[in-house]
Image: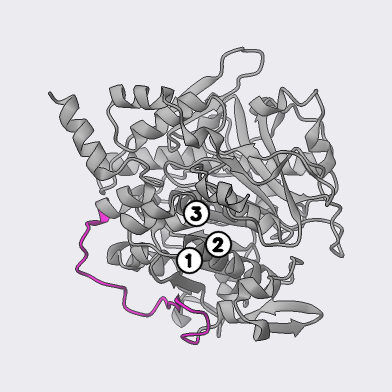
Amino acid sequence: MAWLTRLNPTPEFPSYTGPYKVGSVDVEIPTSQLEAPGPSDSPCTNLSTVAFRIFYPAREESSQKGVKWIPSPQREYVSAYARFLGAGSAFAQVFSVLPQLLYYVSIPVHHNADVLEPPTKSKRWPVMVFSHGLGGSRNAYSHICGSLASHGVVVVAPDHRDGSSPISFVHVPDEKKPKAIEYKKVAHSASAEVYEARDEQLRIRLMELGLVHDALLKIDDRIPLKNVAEDQKTNGGKDMLTMFARTLNVHEPGAISWVGHSFGAATTVQFVKSVYYRPEPNQPDFRALFTPSRDSSLVRQITPASPVMLLDLWTLPIQSPSTAWLRSKPMPCYQSRAGGSNLLAILSEAFYKWSANFDNTKRILQKPSAADSSLSAQPGPHIFYPISSAHLSQSDFGVLFPWVTTKIFGAKEPERVLKLNARAMLQVLRNLGTEVANTSPPDMESDDAKSLRNGVVHDEKILEIREGSVRDWVNLSTETKSGMTNMEKSPEDAMLEGEALGQVISREERESENQRSNI
């Protein structure tokens, strides 16, 4: 029946290649049950819930069905994506009621499966929090999150309610109809108005990450929390969160990894720096976006040892003049002798060739000069890019719609690009002593790539500086010159292209639709 599979037009995800099955739980917790780490007048006081999806290693006997990639209500989500991609409102409405292959795309996880007992020495799973970019959601990076989970990492993917998703829904407790939060259109070019709008989005995003952190602490401590997520209503009232009690490594300082893509990477930078560098009193020309209380558990969690991984960092949101003081501070990792060993940045080729953004990325990631630091001989960050990769290559859209990334963006091998991302992220964790599963020889693309160190198989080549260690995987330096300066696309176009998340409507179709709308 293999020929039937080839004839099936529904996009499908590749299988995860780690040794563990992957489970997934949808979570939405009323903020009234959580302790906000910031001031009481924060923007999150206007949000009733905080939402996220958990990807985790599941028990071997798990056989539950997958999760719909387009969540419920699907019609509203598809309509919102059509509008986000530039379709006129009339076409978006028609597009939403047509039979959609997208409705049938499933994430290959086991929905609400039992978590696997951790085989680690600590009897706890390492935890990672993954912040999505513009047009993203808790589902939009499911393949990289699931891939990491299949190697023994619990990945928490928040759904930001700052207007950066095409649409999101808040399930207000005791109210039948969820509240819709629409996409907030903000320009991609720098201006006072743009910086102010992005600052406000970051305020919400940073507070949400703080609330997610508190939720994880409470989940691990088995403190009862009400889960009002839509797909939990049909789960027979079973509390899926209690199974994670005493299984998450979230209390040890510096244990949680903080990861993001594009705007999510900018969010991650601002988050770890805002927590670590508490604003100095009466700092001139500085407006703090997020200031957790000094005795907050979050302040104890973010340390120079905290792993930070940034995929296609979009730097414009953190160039705001009001946060210049924070921008002047080095990444927290440089406050220890380990330096950038726990700092990983992976660019797509598109963002590498976007010279202005890459120059800012290097300034953000580079280690302090000897004159500015009392610590000598610090390693710099790990920075790489896969050749022929697009911004979409780091999200689900690259593997679901490879014809889009190839035809429109010139990207190649989207599945391999995500494997390279996962390999690098896992090896950074191994180098830090975090117990994760081995990368398979096929993923390492060489049987002799194994390096045994302290009984652990290391994927040494993926982080090597030497050129050619891994095919089409280029090491970068914060001191090197950036890529091409004469680009075919402006930075604004590069962002719009990258954040369009798949462009399932071609440019020609959109132009045609706009022409019809103007008749």
User: What kind of secondary structure does the magenta stretch mostly adopt?
Assistant: loop
SS at circle 1:
strand
Above or below for 104 versus 118: above
For badge 1, the amino acid type reads Ile
The reply to whether discs 2 and 1 touch (Cβ–Cβ < 8 Å) is yes
Mark 2 residue type: Met
Q: Residues within 10 Å of mark 2 (few under 14, many from 20)?
A: many
x 55%, y 62%: residue: 309
Hey, what amino acid is under mark 3? Val
Q: Relative to 518, say whether 303 is above or below.
A: below
Q: Which residues are magenta?
A: 466-492
Task: Point out residue 63 in the picture as x, y percentages from the top left corner.
Answer: 78, 43
Asked whether the residues under the numbered discs 3 and 1 touch, taking CB atoms below 8 Å apart as contact, a structural biologist would say: no
Q: Could one spot residue 280 in this view of the protein? A: no
The residue under label 2 is 309
- Mark 1 = which residue? 346
Query: Residue 113 lies in magenta, yes or no?
Result: no
Name the residue: 50% across, 65% down: 417
Q: Residue furthest left?
A: 519
